[in-house]
Every structure is written in C-alpha cells, then in structure tokens.
C-alpha cells in the first residue's frame, strides 16, 4: 500500500498499516516504515519511538519518522529526556494508556518550561499524544505523536486511532524482544541455538524439520501428541488442528501466532513465526519458512549462576541465591538447601536487590525468569558492571529549518 492511498478515516488502510507492524517482528527495519505510515495516516507532524533507561539516564532507542526532526531526537537522547515532564506523567499511567499533553500542560506551563522552550518550540512542536508501550525494570519504551505549532491539540478521533494502535505496537515490541536472540542464533548457526533452554524447531513448507535444537528434541520426546518422525513433524490429539491452522495463517499473513498445549503433567506455550527471506537465505536454513518456539510454563530453567554473577557482579553465594529464587525456591527453602540461616539468606537477598536494581523479591524473580538461559560451554570471568556516567551536557539546539 503506497502512502498516497492512506487517508484518515479509511478503516481498510488502517488495517493494512497494523499488519505492517507485525511484519517488522522479524524484520526490524520495517518498524520505522510502519510507524511512519500510521503517523501520516492520523495526520501528525512526526512520531517519536523512544526507549528510556532511568538507571543510566540514556535513550538506547530513538526513532523519528521524519528526517528533519532527527536533530531533536538526538538532543532528547543526550539531555532533554531526563527533564521531559510528559515522561514523568506517563510513568504514573498504566502501560498502553494514551496520554495527551493538552490535558495537563497549559500555555502558561509551556511558556516557562525548559523542555518546551529549549527543545520542542524551537523545532516547531507543541502538542503530543501517546503512551508507554513497555515497562520492565529500569527500561520504558514510549511512542509520541506530535503536532506542530499552529495545529490544534489531538482530536478525540486521533486519540481513538492511537488507542487502537497501542495493543498492536505493544505486542510487536514484545515479540521483537523475544525473538532477537533467536534471530541472532539463526545467523550464528546450530551451536548457538542448541545452547538455548527454549525449544526451537525450524520447518519448511512441507512441515519437514530443517532444524530442531536439543530443548525442542527433549520436548518432542516427552509428548505423546507430537513427535519428529524422520524429518517431518507429526501431531495427534486435540491441538493438532489448532497448530496446523496457525502455521498456515502465519504463512499467509506473516503475523506471529501463539497457542497453549497441555498434557497430564505440564503446560507449554508455542509460538509460530514466519522467517523473512534474509534468514531463509542462511546456509543452514535455506529451505525454512517457519520457526516454532516452545517454552514450558512451569519453567525450572534459569540463567546459570555463572551468568548471573557476570551480568550483575554477584558473589558466588549471591548468584546461588538468585538462581534458586528464579527456579522457584522460596527464601527459606534456599537457606535450608544451602545450609545457611534465613537471616544470612535475607542479607544476601538485600545485596542481590541492590546490585540488580530491583526493589522487591517478586520483581527480582520476574526479571530473572525473563533472562535467556544458555548452557555453560566454558569458564568465563566474573566482572562487575560499571556505574552509569554523568548526564551529558545540554546540547546546543539550532532552529528547525
């Protein structure tokens, strides 16, 4: 669909744009194109997708849909993101909630606020509408659509369109983060995928197995409802039709689909992903068109003690505690298993919370179980993470052209 065909109020055009966001899951370069299409569809001046790390006061991701605003995006990442009054308000709102600055900041506030007066106004920007798409630990990802000076605040119709976009963009980002390590594994080869705790099955259009890592082989070996027979995935049971139908829909629409499989002992989450041509061209997976990922809901695996020590600068005892909590042990159970007192375990927990930046034990566990786990292949040096540096000096802002 060309951008000339995109008109505000055209529901078919909007549906087409939303599909483009899912296409970007395995083709990240397409995300900016999809965001640009939506930006123009609702009639805003520019959209800004930005990730903000409150621990380091930096923006690891900053995408602008119009090149003439790139300087403003760079200045935001270097300095102004730390004083953005809109971000402070969005942090108190639920993820996915749509925020409009016109509801909170009047002309009097704008006239004396450094962020508006030194960044937005010199670049001709006045109003925004958007919200938080992702929030985990110290990282938040926002999207903001902007109106230039002279344009009114965002209308109710525009805000409804943004609300319709938010769940799709949230899901796109979540899937992109989940599949990033899988994409790297495809290029790195079989060995990298074999090390993953998550099951990975790569198949071709005849549903023949092109690759199946060790975790997936273990999963297939425990299932009576699925097995790899020779080179072909064979299924039986109540979920056969659901899986095969999902695979065909992904082949047609190229949107990832997920389903849950249960047996008498465990629950498994399966996701079907379309492989783009760039990855199908990799030597080991030349004939592949789909990838199936398998994760056990009752997950007992977690990043190893060695990995945790390396990532967060934990001592061996602290790494054992973190690993135990991630695999489902309570603090008392870990203390008993390790032959230490509960008081000692609590002191270790306080140290782990401080080093990982978490406030509560449940937040720590949620973060730890989300980390990818790889089998230890060789010893690694344990190093501590450096402290974040000081905030960058205020950049000089040129007038927008």
Image (cartoon, helix red, strand yellow):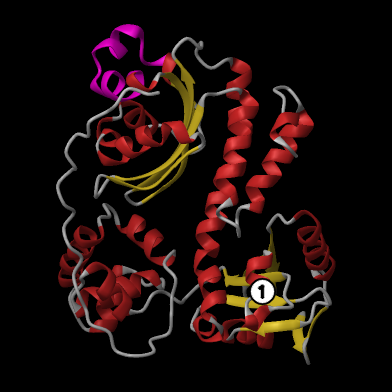
Task: Residue 70 in the image: state x and y as whole percent.
Answer: 41, 36
User: Are there few (<14), some (14-19), or many (20+) residues within 10 Å of tag 1?
Assistant: some
- The residue that mark 1 highlights is 281
The answer to whether any part of residue 368 appears in the image is yes
The residue closer to the viewer here, 69 or 327, is: 69
Q: Position of residue 208 (x, y in %)?
A: 78, 82
| Secondary-structure class at tag 1 | loop
Image quadrant where one finds the C terminus: top left
Residue 301 falls inside the magenta stretch: no
* Residue 123: quadrant of the picture: top left
At 80% across and 63% down in the image, what residue appears? 242
From the image, give the main secondary structure of the stretch colored magenta. Answer: helix
Q: Eyeballing the image, is 360 above or below 288?
A: above
Instruction: Give the answer, above or below, for where 72 lies relative to 382.
Output: above
x and y percent of residue 220 in the render?
68, 84
Residues rendered magenta in the picture: 103-121
């Amino acid at each position: 669909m060309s951008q000339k065909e995109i008109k505000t109020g055209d529901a078919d055009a909007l549906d087409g744009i939303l599909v483009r966001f899912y296409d970007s899951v395995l083709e990240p370069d397409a995300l900016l194109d999809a965001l640009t299409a939506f930006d123009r569809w609702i009639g805003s001046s520019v959209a800004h997708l930005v990730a903000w790390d409150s621990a380091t006061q930096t923006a690891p991701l900053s995408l602008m849909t119009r090149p003439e605003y790139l300087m403003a995006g760079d200045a935001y990442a270097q300095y102004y993101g730390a004083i953005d009054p809109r971000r402070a308000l969005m942090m108190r709102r639920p993820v996915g909630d749509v925020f409009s600055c016109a509801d909170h900041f009047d002309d009097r506030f704008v006239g004396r606020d450094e962020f508006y007066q030194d960044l937005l106004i010199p670049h001709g920007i006045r109003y925004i509408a958007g919200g938080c798409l992702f929030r985990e630990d110290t990282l938040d990802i926002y999207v903001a659509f902007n109106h230039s000076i002279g344009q009114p605040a965002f209308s109710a119709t525009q805000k409804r369109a943004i609300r319709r976009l938010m769940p799709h963009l949230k899901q796109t980002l979540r899937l992109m983060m989940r599949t990033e390590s899988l994409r790297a594994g495809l290029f790195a080869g079989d060995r990298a995928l074999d090390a993953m705790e998550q099951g990975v099955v790569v198949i071709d259009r005849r549903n023949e197995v092109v690759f199946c890592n060790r975790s997936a082989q273990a999963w297939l070996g425990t299932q009576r409802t699925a097995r790899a027979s020779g080179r072909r995935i064979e299924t039986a049971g109540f979920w056969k039709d659901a899986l095969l139908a999902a695979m065909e829909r992904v082949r047609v629409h190229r949107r990832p689909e997920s389903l849950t499989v249960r047996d008498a002992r465990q629950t498994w989450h399966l996701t079907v992903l379309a492989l783009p041509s760039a990855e199908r061209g990799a030597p080991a997976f030349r004939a592949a068109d789909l990838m199936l990922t398998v994760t056990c809901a009752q997950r007992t695996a977690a990043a190893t003690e060695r990995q945790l020590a390396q990532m967060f600068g934990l001592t061996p005892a602290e790494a054992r505690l973190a690993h135990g909590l991630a695999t489902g042990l309570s603090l008392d159970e870990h203390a008993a298993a390790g032959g230490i007192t509960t008081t000692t375990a609590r002191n270790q927990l306080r140290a782990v919370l401080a080093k990982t930046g978490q406030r509560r034990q449940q937040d720590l566990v949620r973060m730890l179980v989300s980390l990818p786990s790889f089998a230890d292949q060789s010893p690694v040096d344990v190093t501590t993470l450096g402290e974040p540096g000081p905030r960058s000096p205020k950049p000089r802002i040129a007038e927008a052209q």
